[in-house]
Amino acid sequence: MSVTRTGEETGPAGADPRTAHLTDPARREPITREGIVHGYTVAIWLAAGIMLLAALVAGLMVTARAPKHGTPADRPVPEPVA
């Protein structure tokens, strides 16, 4: 094994450690699992951010006050009698 300028050890034939999973079958499965977990983690955080943004937009768009229930109307509402 040799050492790169940054002090990282390289695999056989000077392989870069960041791409070792492409040539070393023993490292392929752990790298793939880490990649899958990373993808799901990014997706969850992105979805959470979108939901927070949607909540903020909805909160800013609602400007009317809630109606007061149980108060009498100013004038009676006519109802048709059949």
Image (cartoon, rainbow, N blue to C red):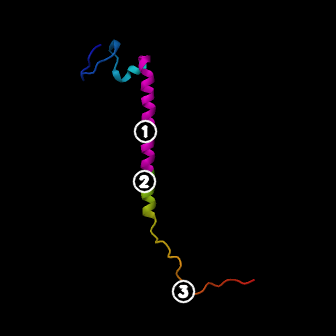
Q: Main secondary structure of the magenta part?
A: helix
Amino acid, disc 2: Leu
Which numbered circle lies on residue 27? none
Q: Quadrant of the N terminus?
A: top left
Query: With 4 as the anchor, is 48 left or right in this view?
Result: right
Residue 7 placement: quadrant? top left
- Examine the structure image and report whether residue 62 is included in the region drawn in magenta: no
Label whose residue precedes the other's in the sequence (1 or 3): 1
- Examine the structure image and report whether residue 46 is included in the region drawn in magenta: yes
Please say if the residues under marks 2 and 1 sit with CB atoms less than 8 Å apart.
Answer: no
Look at the picture and state if 41 lies above or below 34.
below
Cα distance in 3D space between marks 3 and 2: 41 Å
Look at the picture and state if 79 lies above or below 9.
below
Cα distance in 3D space between marks 2 and 1: 18 Å
Classify mark 3: residues with Cα within 10 Å, few (<14), some (14-19) or many (20+): few
Classify mark 1: residues with Cα within 10 Å, few (<14), some (14-19) or many (20+): few
Residue 62 at x, y = what percent? 46, 65
Which numbered circle lies on residue 74? 3
- Determine the residue positioned at 52% across, 76% down: 69
Mark nearest the camera among 2 and 1 is 1
Quick one: SS at disc 1?
helix
- Determine the residue positioned at 35% across, 24% down: 18
